[in-house]
Amino acid sequence: MIDAKYLNPSLPAIDRAEDLLSRMSLEEKMSQIVGFLPGKDPIEQLEKDYPHGAGEVSMLFVGQLRDREEVANQVTQVQQKIMDLSGHRIPAIFHIETLTGGLMPDATVFPSGIGQASTWNPSLQHKLASVIRSQVRAVGATHAFAPVLDISRDSRFGRQGETYGEDPTLAAAMGAAYVLGLQNSGNLKEGALACAKHFLGYHATQGGIHAASTPIPPRALREVYAKPFQAAITKAGLKSVMNTYSSIDGEAVAGSRAIMTDFLRKELGFDGVTVSDYTSILELHTRLKLCESETDAGEQALLAGMDIELPAKACYNDELMKRIRDGKIDMDALDNAVRRVLIAKFKLGLFEQPFPMGKYEREMIFVDPLNKRVGGEVARQSLVLLKNNGVLPLKHTRQKIAVIGHHASSVRSLFGGYTFATLAENMLGMGNTMAGVDFEKISNLSVEEFGTLRDSYAYPGSLVQIEPAKVEEIVRSYYPGTRSLFEQLSLACPEAEFAHAYGYAYAGNDTSKHEEALVAAAEADLVILTLGGKHGWGMTCTTGEGIDATDIGLPECQESFIRKLAVLGKPTVAIHFDGRPISSDAADLHADAILEAWNPGQYGAEAIAGVLFGDTNPAGRLPVSVAYNAGQIPIYYNHDNGSSYHVGTANEFTSYVDCPREPRYYFGHGLSYTTFAYSNLQIEQKSYAPHEPLRVSVDVENTGDLYGEEVVQLYVRDPYASMVRPVLELAGFARIPLAPKEKKTAKFKMEMSQFAFLDANMRWKIESGNMDVWVGSSSRDIRVTGSFHISEDLFIDGKTRGFFADVTISK
């Protein structure tokens, strides 16, 4: 066995995989295409149900562990047993959710995905992913479930907070940066597989309902929804993809060869590992009614090109193995899947190092000061100032400030979906909404230690169950250094006198606490309102996975309080926490300032306090267009000519009869405490051949008296085209730091193929004609414009087209 090729680390991964594949039994091959979800006794589970090992292991079991050492010990024990069971000692890949950081104790917790997108900063996103990579690799995890590359244009959909928002160019740039950081720029022996999800169109479902059918036409599917995935594949070498639960044009994605092989692999050029979203293969039988048995579902998925069934073996079962043995299913279908799994394992170096790092090395990674610096910087840059009539920044003076709302005193409110705080909470029986997981089967936490948290009481006027006080205690126990916003404000301005009043919950219409909060407000010089819902899993949440809504506004208990407070005439600052953006008539009308905080993570309170008191200057930008109400959905800035709020029909009505057609807040919007001027837009040539790169430069000056950052946004528009095109498209962007009176030049370089679109015959085409270039501070706030000409048509390979402009900054 010593001379076996697969044991030689100097050989290419493909050669090692072919050698090992030729030596494996059918049973051992089947073990490589199934996941293992550890329960209360994982070793017994493995011996009983996985006699030949497992391809992947879910790390949701970490929700009941207290620290990174317990995580590493559990990974070591399970990995050792899996290798002992495998005839060739094949190690498993351990996968972990990484949307906001490693989903485990002690890991750095970053803002939610929509908060990360609000930074408009791919280089910072790369640093974020590098921190995550180091931490998860230290405990033995090598497959990271992120980035979420879904294009999200529907705030009813509970998972909007996981995404980079509505725009494919922004998502492509942020997602590619994340993949490069996570996969260590291709050096996977010190990296982790990035698993992009959910392929494809998951957030465009009917009714904004999780897992419902997705009615997207083929052109939009490719030009819009597939663009971030294509960018991650082409620009960053993406090595893993997870399917959507949905169906598209009658085909369930989990079992569609047209989507998972012809589209993903042949058309987009993906060459990595595909994994099923939890139980999505089983749902071909149980929910979508395509297959008459679990085994039929497994056969359809395997033939479609689904490499690994997650979270556990159900459809890639013994009956499926019998069909392969009997020749009813071609062995090549299994071998192709196993080969891809083995290649990934060899590239990750698992045969040489299958276990977590040593304790000292792991300690150095987790105590690295860089973790907090990056976490704090992402939190700061994620904050979006939506409105400010001059009340912000607050002064460091003696004053009375009333801080009102549930979120003000809650550490849990800083954490969104797919954070360890939400996982630990769900382990305690809060009612699960996470698809494909039964937390009661995997949790060992005792009722005696934590008490019984779940009950049947709901907030008045809502289906959302009341969050027990014990939840806050548990979250604080995991993050002892994280303060609530109220606690952090007291430290940020010791000169001021702060008072907290609960006032209202995060759901429902209960107004019983309004009066005491109004009394506190009446005695104050200024009022800070904390608003929003609760983002996570379970019946105590208002948004998150499987938690969709038709009302995208604030709960009535908050909306009505704002109207009552307005009578007092107090200066009011609103801070919004949630997985969807704030949409409130009362806040728009009555709040003097509105700060969108999303769920900013463990360093969020410090970041918010810094912005409120002017220690830092906000520069976040909205990655979504914000609707006035759900009746406008979908609403997004880059709609087609002749559509949405640019419909342009000859009609006396230029709005809905009861609402504007325009968004409440535009894509790219965000305010600063200083001002910026744009000038000297330069387009290098008047005419370009389709193979020449477009070069555009613009000067940006900080014309105010405070240091600030401006997010310069480059948009393009095709005035007349052979297909109906968007009214405006983001092409590139740059977040530029500027001292008072300082001027810098942003230089954009853009491949002409970024203008390509699918023609009537579904060919990628760079079309000749005039093109407009617009540069500004948001999709609505355009400051300078220009144009150029493309000299001739050119058909191209869509895989290698441009996705976002490169940018350099100079003085």
Image: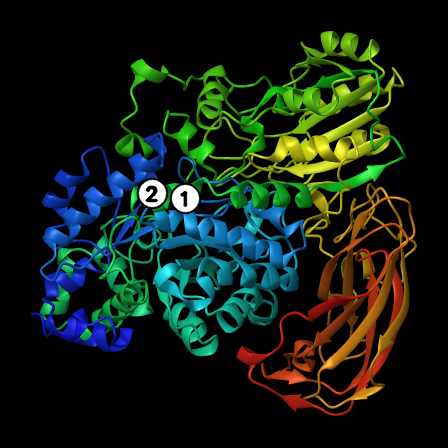
Residue at the limit of the structure toward the left, as seen here:
1
Q: Quadrant of the N terminus?
A: bottom left
User: Residue at (64%, 30%) from the top-left corner?
Assistant: 605
Residue 41 screen position, x and y as percent: 18, 34
Q: Which residue is mark 2?
A: 360
Q: Quadrant of the C terminus?
A: bottom right
Instruction: Look at the picture and state if 706 lies above or below 697.
Output: above
Residue 431 screen position, x and y as percent: 41, 28
User: Residue at (76%, 42%) from the top-left corner?
Assistant: 618
Instruction: Look at the picture and state if 53 lies above or below 681.
Output: above
* Cα distance in 3D space between marks 2 and 1: 6 Å
300 left or right, relative to 682: left
Q: How is the image coloured?
A: rainbow
Instruction: Look at the picture and state if 761 lies above or below 104.
Output: below
Which dot marks residue 364?
A: 1
544 left or right, relative to 259: right
Q: Quadrant of residue 693?
A: bottom right
